[in-house]
Structure formats: structure tokens, C-alpha cells
Image: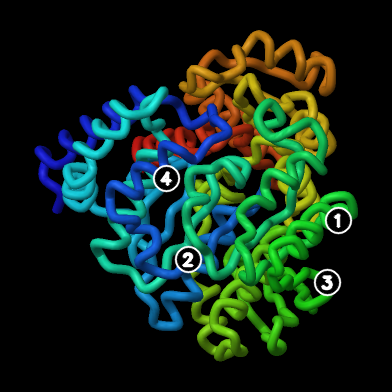
Amino acid sequence: MTSPEDLEAVELIYQALLKRWPESQIERSLDRIAALCDALGSPQLSYPTIHIGGTNGKTTTSRMVDSLMRELGYRTGRFTSPHLESFLERISINGLPIPAEGMIATYNDIALYLDLIDSRQPHPVSFFEAMTALAFVAFAEFPVDIGVIEVGMGGEWDATNVVQSQVSVITPIGLDHQEYLGNTLEEIALTKSGIIKPESHVVLAAQPPEVATVLMARVVERAAIPYREGIEFSVAKRDLAVGGQLISVNGIFGLYEDIFIPLYGAHQSTNAAVAIAAVEAFAGVKLDDEVVRKAFANVDSPGRLEVLYRDPTVIVDAAHNPHGAHALATTLAKEFDFESIFGVVAILGDKDVLGVLQELEPVIDRLVVTQNSSARALPVDRLYELAVGIFGVDRVYKENDLRSAITYAMEQCTLINQVSEGISAVVITGSVVTAGESRSIVRKIAGSEE
């Protein structure tokens, strides 16, 4: 059990990291992270890596690849971002968040090097760069057999791009972070394609034609080996199942049938096919069918269409851009049979708020707008104005904080369910921050009712 002293030390580490350049900003340079990794002895080169970029689905695909590799007998290190509730989640060793004592030891190992690089660079090491270095060192010290590394933002200039990956993965690309990555899909794709390494294996999810053109040009330039969804691999079949879905996948080296995934949404079947292809590309052979089935049966993806509560049904999803909101809305419409849905939305001000609301409007009957604790949160009054313009004044309510919004929506759903033969549900979305805080809030609400 983690001691109170260790928990306090971890919190101090987190607060120290938060004082650094925020991860919501990037600079078009790898100088700091490259210098830091060099000073640390290049830990990221001490194990092979699968590097996963794209706009949506990166974290879930990373978790699927991790589960497959562990089922194959590999010791794994997984680095993902952002976190839902604890920053320890970002660094996972053999499927579990790094323990507090592991984070303390790793931070103590690199603290002096952080200070050294700070003193030698025009700007200090950023929060994300420090987290990336912590992951690289933790994986080297464990040691892991393979690192599953998720890109933070973009690709070419992302701190994770100092790895020399054997396999690069690019999930579906959409518009997001335009202020840093570009205003068109082509510009964003060009930046994200920067993770493709010379003569490596590249697994590409299905993309819009203009994106596919950019990605394949980079593949040719790097003399890499491509595996494209719909050509070298694909989802062969998909059926809804209790608690998730049952799929078959045409992999690079063979067919995988009757794979149960305890996750909802057609986009998760795509993530699964991409994950299988990535591991096949790494292994160079067809995977054992039973290994694949066991790996996916154990997959979870917290904060992604996650059912948090049953009476009333409360679902949380971290959708924070129109592409993600579209996947959420499609899944709600096609895979759930709710009579009505209360939406709770808190979103960050630098996102495409109108785009998200427009995607959600067809499936949400009543909307409660609020804000999360992030300093970047869109103020609730402004979100209310935007929501009224899309949903109409009669369908929109506002609450000043997330807990009040969730409580109100759950109470209203409970009342409706008591007088209706159908089932109403609460769906909470808009941000990873919103998803993380909601998980904690709903747990506390559930605990108070037991």
C-alpha cells in the first residue's frame, strides 16, 4: 500500500512539473528533449518502440497494442496523454500505472538533468518533455521489452519523436490544434507524418483522400513499408454484442475471427484492426488467434464511452473535437436504445465548440452546459450562448460547476425513468478533463447513495 509520505511526494512532483511550460503549447523544436535524452544516456533507444500518432483513437489503440504485446509475453511500457485523474496513469508498466515509489525514484534520477538542460536552453524543459523523459527512463529501468509510445500533439515536433520506432501508427486524422498544426487536413497530416522513420513499418488507419496522399508521400520519401486499412488489412465483420461488439479482422498475415471487444462504437473496431496490424508488423508473422481473443477481452479504455453508473445510466466520453463528437453521436444513435438523453458538456475554450455541439445536437434531447476546473475551460455563460444557438433555448440549461450539472442531469433522468416505460440516460462529454473529473464525481455520488 502506498504510504501517505509517498502520496505527498508524488503531489509535490506533480506541482513542480506543472510550473513548467504547459503541454497545451508546443515549440517547433526537439532541441530540449534531444539534449535531455542525450544527457540521460538515450534511454528511449534501449528498447524497441511502436509509435502511435493521429487525431482520435490514439490512447485506445495504444492500450490495445499494449494488451496484445503483454498477451504475447512481452514486458511493456506504455506512455499516453493526457491523463484522466492522476498523472501516474501516463506511464504504464505491464498494464498498470507506475507506482508512487517508482515515480519518486525516477524523478529523483532525472531532476538534476532537468535543471542542467534548463540552464543551457533558451526555454526550460516543458511539462510534456519532462513527462516523456520520465517515461523513457522508467521503461529503461524496469526494463521493458517494448515501449508503446503515444504522440502528445502533432508528430514531427512532438517530444516523443526522439524514439527510433520499428513501427509507426497513424490513426484517423481530423481538425484539431489548428493553432499549432495547421488549418487544413493536409497541413496537419504533414506534421503528423513526421513520426515515420526511414525503412520502418507504417500502419495507416483509413483517411480522407487528401490526408492519405500526404501520408503516402512521406512513406515513399522515407522508404518505409505501408500497411493501409482497406488494402493490407481491414475489419471483415462487426456485430453488436452484450457489453461491446464481436468483430473479425483481415490482418496483414491472416484472418482473426470472433474477437469480443468490451467497448462500444464502430470506431473501436477500426482501432482494434489498426492495433492488430501494428503488432503483426512488429512481429512479422500472423498472431495466435487465441492470444488475440484474450488480449481484446481484457482491453479497457477509461473515459471512452464508459458506463459509470446504471440507475440512471451515466456514460462519459472524452470527445473534445468534432471528429470525436461524431463518433460518440453515431454510437449513441446506433448502439444504444435510450428514450431520451441528457447531455452534460464542459469544453475547453480553444476547441471547435460549435463543431462539437453541432455533432451532438441530433442525439441529445436536453443539454446541461457547465465548465470543468481547467484554466482553459470555456466560461459557462459563453457556452450557454453558443448552445442556445444550436439547440434552442428550451433544450439548454446551465450549471456553474460540473458536479452540480451531473447531479441535476441524474436527478432529472431518474424522475423521467420513474414515469416512463423507456430509459433515459446521462452522457457527459466535451474534454478529457471533463471525463476525468466526472469519473471522480460520479464515484462520490454513487458512494453517497449506497
The amino acid sitting under disc 2 is Thr
Circle 3 residues within 10 Å: few <14, some 14–19, many ≥20? few
User: Closer to the camera: disc 1 or disc 4?
Assistant: 4
Q: Earlier in the sequence, mark 1 or mark 4?
A: 4
Q: CA distance from mark 3 to mark 2?
A: 25 Å
Task: Report whether 225 appears left or right of 293.
Answer: right
**Corner quadrant of residue 316:** top right
Image marks 3 and 2: residues in contact by CB distance under 8 Å: no
Q: Residues within 10 Å of mark 4 (few under 14, many from 20)?
A: some
Foreground mark, 2 or 4, reads 4
Residue ID for mark 4: 34
Residue 49: image tag: 2
Query: Marks 2 and 4, Cα distance to the nearest angstrom?
Result: 17 Å
Identity, as a three-letter code, of the amino acid under mark 4 = Ala
Q: Residue at x 81, y 56 (%)?
A: 207
Question: Of label 3 and label 2, which has the lower sequence position?
Answer: 2
**Quick one: which residue is furthest to the right in this view?**
209
The residue closer to the viewer here, 313 or 169, is 169
Tell me the number on the disc at residue 213.
1
Name the N-terminal-most of marks 4 and 3. Answer: 4
Circle 1 residues within 10 Å: few <14, some 14–19, many ≥20: some
> Label 1 vs label 2: CA separation?
25 Å
Mark 2 secondary-structure assignment: strand
**Label 1 amino acid?**
Thr
- Circle 3 is placed at which residue position? 230
Indicate the position of residue 13 as horizontal and vertical percent values.
Answer: 24, 34
- Which secondary structure, mark 1? helix
